[in-house]
Image (tube, grey):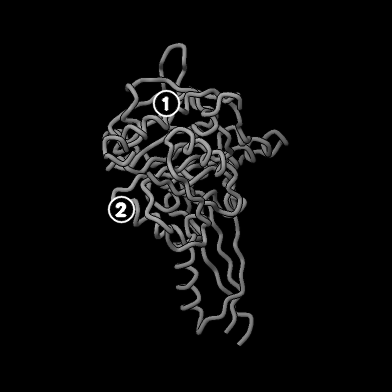
Amino acid sequence: MIFKAEVIITPREGVLDTQGKAVEKTLTNLGYKGLDEVRVGRIVQMDLEALNAESALESLKSMCQDLLANDLIETYKISVKEISR
Amino acid sequence: MRTSVVVFPGSNCDRDVVRAVADTLKSHVDMIWHEEKDFPEKPDLVILPGGFSYGDYLRSGAMAARSPIIEAVRTHASAGGLLLGICNGFQVLTETKLLPGALLPNTSLTFICRKCHVRVEQTDNSFTAGFKAGTIVQFPIAHHEGLYFLPENELMELEKNRQVVFRYADPKSGESGEKYAPNGALNGIAGICNRQGNILGLMPHPERATIAHLNGGTDGVMFWNSIAKTFAERGAL
């Protein structure tokens, strides 16, 4: 089975996110109100072949631990969607 | 004495380091491509130089930290060999977890390239043993991700264990600390070592302050001489 996978990586709570702060300030300057805790992260997308959704998720988690995220400063969310059998 | 300088795709301070080390330490220097699995000859000192390894993709130093040569770098350091990471090399060391913490984007969100002053905070390691504690040196910095970060409890631990080796400082008052850090580094930290004192990472570039006519000053010579002292005591020079 082939899955369309997406990993969203964001700065961990309590870690200074200078980009998020700058974006928040600029949005506020543009007149947007009521926003707080703006965080800027990144998205990694891939097509992944796996036996089932469970093993795809497991493999992606391992990729996050090995390379995609730095657990000291970042957290991640993984999602997978089957695109073919 | 033998030094190995690891070269990653995107390293750009490798030749500066080779020149600085060859001139001051009178060391034989090998340049080792990151795809090698081992050092051709056993080095006494391994240096991860500055630059933009892998274009800083994903996170600075992240991809370089997973290069084939890194296993040999780990083996070298775990046997007590000296391992030095400068700028991007420091980022690689934190990504390998050989040193604690992470280097985040500067608070200014700009690339900062200028001369700056750091104070030698402690001399109880293999790299700054030749300094008098409190000495202030001028080394240039050139980075976008230089804000040293470590969660509060671990930061206290790092300070308690005397692992903060260099801190940004004011040359007039002799004070050091966060307010003198051009990048917002926590506690003004510019360089740290591991508990054993054989692995050092720092953001400033001593190799750019080694050759007088390059206008970066010559305070870097004091740093290389300090390392030379360690090797002289070991009988390796």
Q: Nearer the viewer, residue B43 or B140?
A: B43
| Quadrant that contains the C terminus of chain A | bottom right
Q: Nearer the viewer, residue A18 or B103?
A: B103
Element under disc 1: helix
Q: Give left or right: position of B137 versus A30.
A: left
Q: Residue furthest right?
A: A30
Residue B222 bears which disc, if any?
1
Mark 2: amino acid:
Ser
Give the mark nearer the N terminus: 1 vs 2: 2
Expressed as whole percent of the image width and height from the top left, the position of residue B189 reads: 42, 32
Q: Is residue A6 above or below residue B114?
A: below
Question: From mark 1 to mark 2, how far is it between C-alphas?
Answer: 26 Å
Q: Nearer the viewer, residue B221 or A61?
A: B221
Mark 1: amino acid:
Met
Q: Residue at x 29, y 53 (%)?
A: B79
Expressed as whole percent of the image width and height from the top left, the position of residue B51 reads: 58, 44
Q: Quadrant of residue A18?
A: top right
Expressed as whole percent of the image width and height from the top left, the position of residue A46 reads: 61, 70
Q: Residue furthest bottom?
A: A85
Q: Nearer the viewer, mark 1 or mark 2?
A: 1
Q: Residue at x 62, y 35 (%)?
A: B111
Residue B104 bears which disc, if any?
none
Q: Residue at x 57, y 37 (%)?
A: B143
Q: Residues within 10 Å of mark 1 (few under 14, many from 20)?
A: some
Q: Give left or right: position of B34 versus B215.
A: left
Q: Residue at x 48, y 66 (%)?
A: A63
Expressed as whole percent of the image width and height from the top left, the position of residue A2 reads: 59, 81
Element under disc 2: helix
Residue B78 bears which disc, if any?
2
- The subunit carrying tag 2 is B
